[in-house]
Amino acid sequence: MNRDVDWRGLNYEIDLLDIQQLNTGLREGRFDVAKASFHAALSLSEHLVVLPSGSALGYGVGPLLLSCHQNQRPTHVEQVTLCPGQDTTASLLFRLFYPDTTQVKQVLFSDIMPQLAHGEADFGVCIHEGRFTWQKAGLHLVEDLGTRWEAETGCPLPLGGILASRQLGDSVIARVQATISDSLRMARTSPQITLKTMRKYAQEMDDQVLMNHVDLYVNDWTEDLGEVGQRALVELNCRARAVGISPTDSPDLSVWCSTQSL
């Protein structure tokens, strides 16, 4: 966005959107490259490839299932659970761990905690900065869905990554990947450089919350998924297929790799 790294002859038109808007845009073919939920990526694997850099994957990074009342759990269909978009990995986890327990209502992620605090639903699946602020809203933790994923699979939780259209071809994808890799390396080395941009667009404006968010979601797997990251994607695909959430005839998610020099 700020051209602090070499764009390698490419021009980017950058849109900053809600994660479900990004998922939908990729599904409709409106983006060549976009951050997206790995849930959405499962059904788009024939047309898109996961870039090795830019993913949100790790331990202790999962969405939280919150309730408006203490000691309440999803048990019957009269209850309502708010989720941040039907293609988000957060929604996928709720469906994996709490199938057919409540009515699910999809809303903008930033509306979940306010609606839950006002009693407009029984539960909400919280993502992003809300992981650090839910107690201030007077809400109650039902379960950390990421912790449950880790316990059941032994894998870090793959939330989302950067996907590129296979139609771009290896040469262009290589330049996109190199640019993202350089940008991440710069941001991790000098995090203060990115703080001004984060303040401009983040829902939560407290600098400490913003940096906590970065420390949690940006790690070595963000720079390169590697074998552990790829194994986590395989596990996500298998579990989604087993319960009929992911198409059984679609190709597995593949992580792009190339030995081309740039």
Image: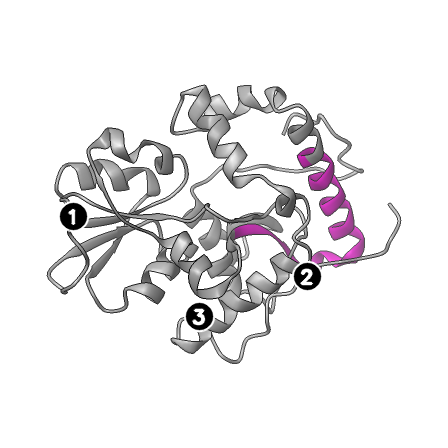
What residue appears at the point 25 percent right and 48 percent down from the top-left corner? 124
- Badge 2 is on which residue? 166
- Badge 3 is on which residue? 240
The residue mark sitting in front, 2 or 1, is: 1
What residue appears at the point 35 percent right and 57 percent down from the top-left corner? 91
Q: Amino acid at mark 2?
A: Arg
- Badge 1 is on which residue? 121
Classify residue 88 by image quadrant: bottom left
Question: Whole-percent x and y of residue 37?
Answer: 48, 53
Q: Where the N terminus falls, by quadrant?
A: top right
First along the sequence among labels 2 and 1: 1
Q: Which mark is residue 32?
A: none
Q: Outermost residue toward the right? A: 261
- Asked whether the residues under the numbered discs 3 and 2 touch, taking CB atoms below 8 Å apart as contact, a structural biologist would say no
Asked whether 185 falls inside the magenta stretch, the response is no
User: Which SS class for mark 1?
Assistant: loop
Marks 2/1: CA–CA distance: 40 Å
Residue toward you, 194 or 76 = 76
Marks 1/3: CA–CA distance: 26 Å
Q: Determine the main secondary structure of the stretch shown in magenta.
A: helix
Classify residue 12 by image quadrant: top right
- Asked whether the residues under the numbered discs 2 and 1 touch, taking CB atoms below 8 Å apart as contact, a structural biologist would say no
Q: Amino acid at mark 1?
A: Ala
